Amino acid sequence: MRPEQHIPVLLDEAIEALVTRKDGHFVDGTFGRGGHSRALVARLNEQGRLLALDKDPRAIATGLEVLGSDDRVTFIQGSFAELEQWILDWGVRGGVDGILLDLGVSSPQLDDPERGFSFMEDGPLDMRMDPTRGVSAAEWLAEAPEREISRVLWEFGEERHARRIARKIVMSRGHQPLERTSQLAELIEGMLGRPEKKHPATRSFQAIRIQVNNELADLAKGLEAGIRQLRPGGRLVVISFHSLEDRLVKRTFREAARPGQVRRNLPEHPDAVPVLKLVGKAQKPSDTEISANPRARSAVMRVAEKLG
């Protein structure tokens, strides 16, 4: 697979669920390398519009390359956590017809050692979706207290050896800074050994990436903003790749679809009626898709529709 290739997951299912009208206004909150966006635009007529967001400047550069000549498409480099503001800046009032969030790391990000997302090849320990902002993984590991590192590994990676790994990181950084992906991977492997199925650093890398990019907090903000910014009949489609994300999406959708429930951060409704309705059940990729794209195996898609 070439560095800039990316196979969109649940492509047909996501677009079928999302595009309910050809002249609508839609948002792809995670443009990536544009697989979903290209399929979405192909469904729109001349009146249809797409707002494409991504934190990663490389993703936006790719977008301008492949869809920049289409005047129906607007690109913004930014997080879907600020979805509400981006939609207002786009000039849309009264809500949009659909929002897609395809979460996680794209194949080009994983496959580029310079981004630091993967332990498969040595590279700088960065892990930022937007490498021009915020604190890198190396900087965070250099300063974070042992207790904080342990908490992150446990909560975001569900790593049962979180305390041991955190202690080892703090001990090691006193002698030599952790600046490379290979250093961190080897430190963890040296402690835990190398099982056959999964590299022992997998959970720790996931947890640190989530921490560095504020992923779960941004997702919570993005979901709430997305629900507010949908017009009646508009749909929110979310594809998750690990249990923490999917749990948050599932809980947010269920709370918003439950009558008589006081919903945090959502507009008050005098009759306390549901804000959303759930559309179908959670969908997973077919065996055929997983065979063609093994990275799709953990994907889960959930769909909800805004009520009037």
Image (tube, grey):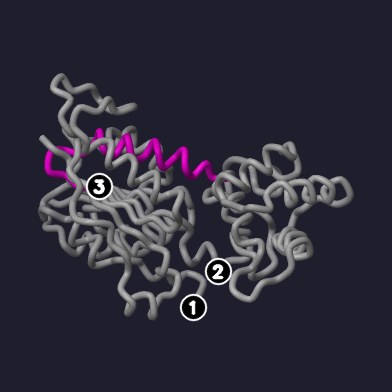
The quarter of the picture where residue 15 lies is bottom left
Magenta segment includes 222? yes
**In which quadrant will I find the C terminus?**
top left
Label 1: how many Cα within 10 Å (few below 14, some 14–19, many 20+): few
Secondary structure, magenta segment, majority class: helix
Q: Amino acid at mark 1?
A: Met
SS for dot 3: strand
CB under 8 Å between discs 2 and 1: yes
Residues shaded magenta: 212-236
Of residues 29 and 78, which is closer to you in this image?
Answer: 29
**Compared with residue 117, is residue 262 higher up or lower down, i.e. above or below?**
above
Residue drawn at 33 percent across, 77 percent down = 287
Residue bearing mark 2: 111
Mark pair 2, 3: CA separation: 29 Å
Q: Point out residue 226 in the picture as x, y percentages from the top left corner.
A: 29, 39
Residue bearing mark 1: 1
Residue bearing mark 3: 236
Residue drawn at 41 percent across, 42 percent down = 219
